[in-house]
Image (spheres, rainbow, N blue to C red):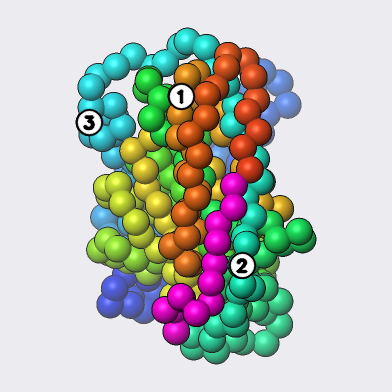
Amino acid sequence: MSQRCLSRPFASGVAPLLLGVLSCLSFSCRAKPDEQAKDDAKTEAPEPGSARAIQEEMGTLPPPDVVQKVTNSAGRQPYSGPTATVRGVVRIKGDSAPKTALTGGVEPRCEMAEPMFGRLFREGPGRTLADVLVTVTEYDGYVPVPAGKETVMVRGEGCAWDRRTIALTFGQRIGVVAADRRPYVPDLVGQRRVAELFAMPGADPIHLVPAAPGQYALQDSMRLYSRSDVFVLAYSTHDVTGLDGVYEISGVPVGKVKIGAYLPATTGVAEKVVELEAGKTKEVDLEIEYKADADSTP
């Protein structure tokens, strides 16, 4: 089952596509003529302007040569030397997060709206810090995104996205799914939107492709408070913390590197320079300080 799609301005109709699944009991079995016709129809080019055509266009990744110009401008071969892993916990120190108003109000039974977006930042047990972008940089080598990892999935559940910071490498895309019984309308703020795409319960993911590296926001057009920071980076060595504050980045070339942590909600930063050894895991904990009197967020 596919998602609903309404072009802007809204169209009056909805064009869902029901994709059949053909199963055979033996390796050599053949489809019946009517089943084969349905299967052939799936591979035909979608009608221009249809829901399927718009989603395919919006979900198409940039060509490899365009990606390489950004992520590997020197044209190096993928790094194949010794690697290490960096792992640790990010914590907050200083003042607690103040409450924030949820823009547009909250509909009934939205159990994740307040926990996710009701305070300036999310803090876990022991002052662990969620939604921190952690990066490893300043190593010698080109580390591509692993094969099969072209999509970073985001769940809409309880009237909220499942995280407040999303990190991608240029050449990846965001996949949005409705994980409960509500529809969600993801908008990648920061680039032109050609259609309003609805992530429907039980439907295929909505795919959103950043056009260039930089900072964006993923906003639910039905719930304006549900807005997560999106960072599209030119390198693949990054992670985002959950409520436990834990991050882990593997496959990093050995030697001296910089570990950076950034909390978008406060612009707080922490950094450390460490030496990585082949085949070992380096434990690097970080602290980001927050002082309420220095915060200018309304």
Answer with mark 2 or mark 1, whichever residue precedes in sequence.
2
| Dot label at residue 256 | 1
Residue 287 covered by magenta stretch? yes
**Residue sitting at x 48%, y 34%:** 273
| Dot label at residue 13 | none
Please report the bounds of the magenta region as a residue range.
286-298
Answer with mark 2 or mark 3, whichever residue precedes in sequence.
3
Label 3 residue SS: helix
**Residue sitting at x 59%, y 86%:** 106
The span from disc 2 to disc 3 (Cα, nearest Å) is 42 Å
Image quarter for residue 75? Answer: top left
* On screen, residue 5 above or below 33: below
- Identify the residue position indicated by label 2 in the image: 94
Left or right of 190 in this view: 38: right
Left or right of 279 in this view: 77: left
Return the residue nearer the eye: 54 or 59: 59
Left or right of 166 in this view: 126: right
The span from disc 2 to disc 1 (Cα, nearest Å) is 30 Å
Amino acid type indicated by mark 3: Lys
**Residue sitting at x 29%, y 73%:** 8
Return the residue nearer the eye: 60 or 289: 289
Amino acid type indicated by mark 1: Lys
Which quadrant of the rendered structure holds the C terminus?
Answer: bottom left
Which marked residue is nearer to the observer: mark 3 or mark 1?
1
Q: Where is residue 146 in the image (x, y as percent from the top left)?
A: 49, 27
The span from disc 3 to disc 1 (Cα, nearest Å) is 25 Å
